[in-house]
Image: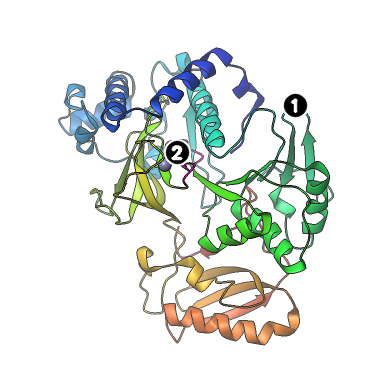
């Protein structure tokens, strides 16, 4: 998650929202829902009055804005997909959009072509303030020194980091963070001694693996590590926690900024309900039950220049049916399993159903000794390209055999596998690492 300098420029709004969020953290569940319903009603009125796409949609389906009074009424409105946003971009812009000072934003396009959309000034304010709450929950205090490892591009491999004095933060580019550069980066961190590290889990995991394998001694003690933007696999978490000797707090959001989920002090995932309404839907757009996996679909309260109502994000999660002892009544999310597209086809042409598809059971570093990193690319239904980084190239045969056994057990004995030994898995345009790339899915 990156912020622009301009995000810091609205202190009055930020302080006001921050004060509200401090109170609403302890609201009863009923009171938070009441707040959501108020926000929803004004958004729906605005969408009908000012956004041509929604006016057409409501008229076509016989929906009057007054019919949508609570979140239970929301399913009457058809969902919004990325395809609709591309096709109806102009119609989704409110006729009074200028009054919300929007700017054009877009997804990074690591999963296909980038998606463009407008975002209000208020979304920046809200994101900044909600993130402040999230960082606080993970132990961040003002003026604490921190390091950030994510998609900023600093020009070349020589420039692995940049120190930002104003933010008291070391900003490290994930683009070149791989096994060859770990020592340089850890030496720099040891010099600076940050209290918090936040960033992409794969990049932080790579550092943790290096510490684990080389017994590198870190001379700083971290309060916590905050991860975001990529799926945090359980194996990543355990090695990061062990190597850095601190707790990991995972945060989930999307570039489109429609939904926020993060871990509380007790490491339960909560949906920040003042930010948006979140639904989990199956392929027929019906709500899934507790503990069933569904696509995160969200209605954000903060974007009026281009409202996203029931926007299907492409990410999968489950609801937990339990409450949390931390006192926060915001809904508890059981598990975030990542992107719907991170799937492989078996040799019968079946998409391995996501709930059964545990990425880490295939790309398992613990099961395959000496394997540092893997990327699986599927270009055809019966063949996979598997890129591997090894601790030591003499173990190549053994690792390939072990990995092939795991892959074939899940995807069919006749799956052909072509291994390529590499020392670098290419990063995506945003510096993220994709563990699975399925080129059969657009
Ligand atoms: Zn909690």
Callout 2: few (<14), some (14-19), or many (20+) C-alpha neighbours within 10 Å?
many
Look at 49% across and 78% down and name the residue there: 407
Q: Which mark is residue 260?
A: 2
Question: Dominant secondary structure of the magenta stretch?
Answer: loop
For this rendering, which residue is in front, 347 or 201? 201
Quarter holding residue 297 = top left
**In this rendering, does residue 51 appear at all?**
yes
Please give the range of residues in magenta.
254-266
Look at 29% across and 41% down and name the residue there: 79
Look at 20% across and 25% down and name the residue there: 69
Q: Which mark is residue 103?
A: none
From the image, tell me which residue sits under label 1. 166
**What x and y, as percent, mark residue 56?**
25, 29
For this rendering, which residue is in front, 164 or 333? 333
* Label 2 vs 1, first from the N-terminus: 1
Q: Is residue 117 above or below residue 41?
A: below
Quarter holding residue 84 = top left
**In this rendering, does residue 155 appear at all?**
no
**What x and y, as percent, mark residue 289?**
24, 52
**What x and y, as percent, mark residue 259?**
42, 38
Q: Are marks 2 and 1 in contact (CB under 8 Å)?
A: no
Q: Would residue 115 appear left or right of 348 to someone viewing this image? A: right
Q: Is residue 337 above or below residue 349?
A: above
Callout 1: few (<14), some (14-19), or many (20+) C-alpha neighbours within 10 Å?
few
Q: Disc 2 and disc 1: Cα gap in Å? A: 27 Å
Look at the image and tell me in which quarter the C terminus lies: bottom left
For this rendering, which residue is in front, 202 or 193? 193
């Amino acid at each position: 998650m990156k912020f622009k300098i301009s995000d810091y420029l609205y202190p009055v709004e930020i302080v006001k929202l921050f004060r509200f969020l401090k109170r609403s953290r302890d609201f009863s569940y009923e009171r938070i829902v009441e707040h959501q319903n108020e926000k929803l009603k004004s958004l729906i009125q605005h969408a009908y009055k000012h956004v041509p796409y929604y006016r057409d949609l409501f008229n076509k389906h016989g929906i009057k804005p007054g019919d949508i009074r609570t979140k239970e009424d929301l399913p009457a409105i058809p969902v919004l997909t990325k395809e609709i946003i591309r096709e109806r971009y102009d119609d989704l812009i409110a006729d009074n959009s200028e009054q919300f000072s929007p700017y054009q934003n877009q997804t990074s396009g690591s999963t296909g072509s980038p998606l463009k959309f407008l975002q209000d000034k208020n979304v920046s304010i809200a994101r900044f303030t909600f993130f402040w709450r999230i960082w606080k929950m993970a132990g961040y205090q003002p003026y604490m020194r921190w390091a950030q490892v994510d998609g900023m591009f600093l020009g070349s491999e020589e420039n692995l980091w940049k120190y930002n004095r104003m933010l008291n933060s070391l900003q490290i580019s994930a683009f070149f963070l791989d096994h060859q550069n770990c020592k340089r980066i850890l030496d720099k961190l040891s010099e600076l001694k940050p209290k918090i590290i936040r960033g992409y889990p794969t990049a932080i995991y790579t550092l943790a693996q290096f510490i684990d394998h080389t017994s590198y001694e870190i001379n700083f003690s971290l309060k916590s590590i905050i991860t975001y933007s990529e799926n945090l696999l359980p194996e990543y978490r355990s090695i990061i926690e062990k190597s850095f000797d601190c707790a990991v707090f995972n945060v989930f959001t999307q570039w489109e900024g429609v939904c926020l989920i993060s871990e509380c002090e007790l490491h339960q995932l909560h949906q920040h309900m003042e930010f948006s309404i979140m639904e989990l839907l199956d392929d027929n757009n019906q709500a899934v039950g507790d503990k069933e996996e569904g696509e995160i679909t969200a209605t954000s309260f903060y974007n009026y220049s281009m409202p996203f109502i029931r926007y299907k994000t492409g990410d999968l999660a489950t609801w937990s049916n339990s409450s949390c002892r931390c006192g926060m009544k915001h809904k508890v999310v059981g598990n975030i399993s990542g992107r719907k597209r991170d799937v492989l086809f078996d040799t019968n042409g079946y998409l391995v159903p996501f709930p059964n598809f545990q990425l880490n059971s295939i790309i398992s570093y613990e099961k395959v000794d000496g394997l540092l990193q893997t990327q699986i690319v599927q270009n055809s239904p019966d063949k996979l390209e598997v890129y591997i980084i090894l601790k030591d190239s003499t173990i190549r045969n053994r690792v390939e055999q072990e990995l092939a056994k795991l892959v074939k057990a899940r995807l069919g004995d006749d799956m052909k596998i072509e291994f390529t030994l590499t020392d670098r898995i290419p990063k995506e345009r945003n510096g993220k690492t994709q563990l699975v790339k399925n080129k059969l899915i657009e």
